Amino acid sequence: MPRAQNIFRQVIFTVLLIFVQVCVHNLAKATPGIPVLPRPNFNPAPSPRLVVPRQSGSSIPNGWQFFSCFVDNTAAGRLLTTESNLPSNTMTPAECIGYCSANNWSYAGVEYGGECWCDEYLHQVGFQETASSNCNMPCNGDATQTCGGPNLIDVYWNGDFEQEGNPVTLSRSFWSFVGCFVDNVSQRTFPAQVQAVGGVYPPSCADACAFYGYTMMGTEYGDECWCGNSTDTASQAPDTDCVMTCSADRDYYCGNANRLSVYQNNPPAETYTNECLAGQLPSWLNVTRLSILASPKEPSTLQTGWNGAVLRIIDVLTVGDTTWSLLSACQNCNITWIDLSFGNNTDPQGFLVPTVPYPEGIQGPNPSPIISIDLHQGESVIFQTEATLPDGYNGYDGYCASESPYPDDSPYSPTNGPIFLGNGHADNWAICQNISASPVNRLDLVFQPVAQHPNYMLEDCIAVDLFLE
């Protein structure tokens, strides 16, 4: 009987407790201010977690912002296509953004509490934006933050506006997009794979292939640069096949697996007369006070590439009363003269003579007059103190103005003026990095550069036109 008595007592206790709760509840409704007692729970569930619906402030890295919540993993694929493979158990928006940002992506997305996805573009075809409140799954790494949901992705953005991944033309160059082509390891479309300065993306690959004399180039699999002169029998694929972003610059596409984003170099036709104009100069050009502008024949596609400079006369050696100077693109070297003339007359040919000392009107007595001396293949335009020239030698007078190879107002010509000719050639000038000079890699003008020169590397020379201003 003791067991039956215990059961009877528990039943009586429970009935009385319920009766008391009902009475108190009714009294509380009738009497404001009296709290309603919670119903006892002998098997309590865990307390619900506080979830902040959207991250803000210091939890999101500087420069990034919440973009929106999207339905993901649909029949169209993924909204963001690169999975980070970061540990799921530590995932937060900040951790995902940090990874995507370090790898040059513009978009970061967290999904299903512990997934992180990156991309340069939102592949929005076939995807539906939804209310941000739907992306409410707590993050595995911090339950007070949200990380999307099942097939729902919280997307963040760094503010970088999208540009065309395969641009029609590369900035400031003669390279244009040809299309997407099939490639494979057993039969390459282009024969030469090369390294590109600053990593592979279309501008750097174009510069690298142009240097080696190729007229076509292709980027592949995110970080490969290939050079050639023809796609030959390679099959063309839809442009949508070449959508892998470049590892070095996510603003561009670099082909895909077995796909090449192909560009071709189409420079304008040039016609050098290599003859002196003799008196046919534009009226605006003052032949007694000239400047020479060195302009690359093939503009660099890189934003950091060298794209021309006004040449200066700098001193390079002084022995006793004799000083030797040369034409250089160095803008902070020991400049002694800034303007030139063809001798002491108005005829646009003859000796090359500096006319205006630097800085004009500030320094004391003018430096000793200098004059051009013999021009040799592989060497710079050299000047020597005129008073120290050997007896019977009056300097070199083989310079003149020549007709520009470009039509007036051509986008490839910085001026409509004539170009500079020496030794009968206006088409053989280059700017070379002088590896033996101070400062190191000083950019000096060279006539017909040669291989194995002690002062420069031929592969580092940039072909230029010299425009008279």
Image (tube, helix red, strand yellow):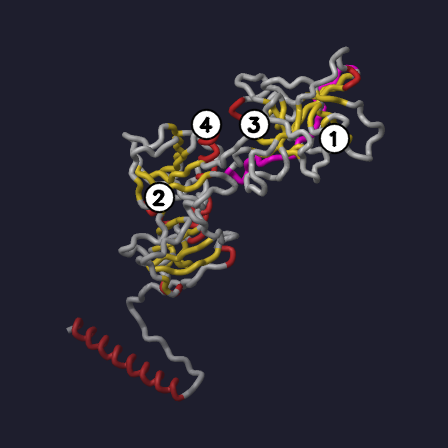
The residue lying furthest to the right in this view is 365
Q: Who comes first in sequence, dot 4 or dot 2?
A: 4
Q: Secondary structure at mark 2?
A: loop
Q: Amino acid at mark 4?
A: Tyr
| Contact? badges 4 and 2 (CB < 8 Å) | no
Task: Give the side of residue 208 with respect to residue 273, left or right.
Answer: left
- The first of marks 3 and 1 along the sequence is 1
Which type of secondary structure does the marked residue at label 4 adopt? Answer: loop
**SS under mark 1:** loop
Residue 42 occupies which quadrant of the picture?
bottom left
Q: Which residue is mark 3?
A: 427
Stretch of the chain drawn in magenta: 301-320
Which mark is drawn over residue 242?
A: 2
Q: Which residue is mark 1?
A: 346
Q: Is 265 situated above or below 7?
A: above
Spatial separation of the CA atoms under disc 3 and disc 1: 24 Å
Q: Amino acid at mark 2?
A: Cys
Per the model, the C-alpha gap separating discs 3 and 2 is 38 Å
- Say which residue label 4 marks: 212
The amino acid type of the residue labelled 3 equals Asp
How far apart marks 4 and 1 lie (CA) works out to 42 Å
